[in-house]
Amino acid sequence: MNSKVTNRIALSVIVLCAAAMAAVLISMLGYILVKGLSSISWHFLTTSASPFMPGGGIKDQLWNSFYVLFITMLLTVPIGVCGGIYLAEYAKPGKITSFIRTCVEVLASLPSIVVGMFGMLLFVNYFGFKYSVLSGALALTVFNLPVIVRVTEDGFRALPRHQKEGGLALGMTHWHTIKTILLPAAFPSILTGIILSAGRVFGESAALLFTAGLSTPDLNFENWNPLAPDSPLNLFRSAETLSVHIWSVNTGGIMPDVDTIANGSAAVLVICVLIFNLFARMLGKIINQKFSGK
């Protein structure tokens, strides 16, 4: 078999695999959207869920999803980026560094249900945070840290060496070189890790079943005092997210329109993830252009 035939076969296999992957993704998203778009309305998005009566919405669950996402990213991004910078720029080869990398890889391979059980034992029971927004965010922080750490480290290591050497040759300190030269150059890779991490947070359910809870108190969206028990900003209240709500409705829902609620919730979840990813990529492009001076 000559090289041209081999090249055509390899190209055909690659194209076929890519087409199959795209077909699976399009069919899955198409099925969810076709089944659920007709259930989405302003009433559905702005009405609280009802455990028994028809016509319930997802207002509280949608808010909880974004709130848990915000708190998780607030904890995960600084720690993960700093950890990746340390491993890429400051850590010296040795047993301690190898041990840290092993721990990161082990955390990345843990199933979300295990992280949820760990979060329940540590944050819910031991620290006494109970089923709350804070417990769920802390558990998801543990779940998502390895992604941002590894992507940040790989992003820094993929940069040309002359960028760092040029900054140091100009008399800049190591940290100033990282802040002004390396970090802006590695920002697209870091943003990719943040997007992947955020997508996992928004769509995660197994870890939140044991930490954030399966219920939401009656929230008063006119009371923004974070210490009030019915405030949407209260970190110590239970918070059923949209993904958990989908699981709960499909497994134990007894309302007459259970299929409508489940399909609509799934469609909203998919749309939110798509919008968030597109917005994050656009924002990352703008910030990268600003940092790089392009």
Image (cartoon, rainbow, N blue to C red):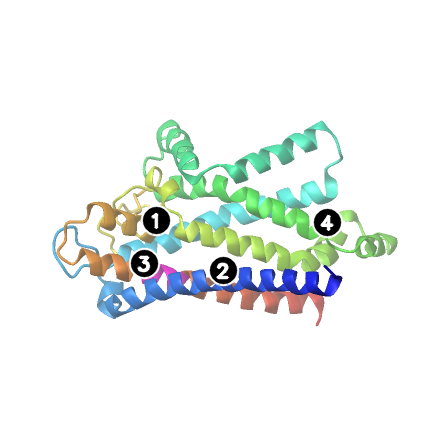
Quick check: can you spot residue 214?
yes
Q: In the rendered view of the protein, which quadrant contains the N terminus?
A: bottom right
Quick check: can you spot residue 222?
no
Question: Element at badge 3?
Answer: helix
Residue 198 % position (x, y): 48, 53
Q: Magenta residues: mostly which secondary structure?
A: helix
Q: Which residue is mark 4?
A: 157
Question: Element at badge 1?
Answer: loop
Q: Which residue is mark 2?
A: 21
Answer with mark 4 or mark 2, whichever residue precedes in sequence. 2
Answer yes or no: do the residues labelled 1 and 4 have beta carbons within 8 Å? no
> Is 275 on the left or on the right of 5, as rendered?
left
The magenta stretch spans which residues? 267-272
Question: Element at badge 4?
Answer: helix
Answer with mark 3 or mark 2, whichever residue precedes in sequence. 2
Q: Which residue is mark 1?
A: 226
Q: CA distance from mark 2 to mark 1?
A: 44 Å
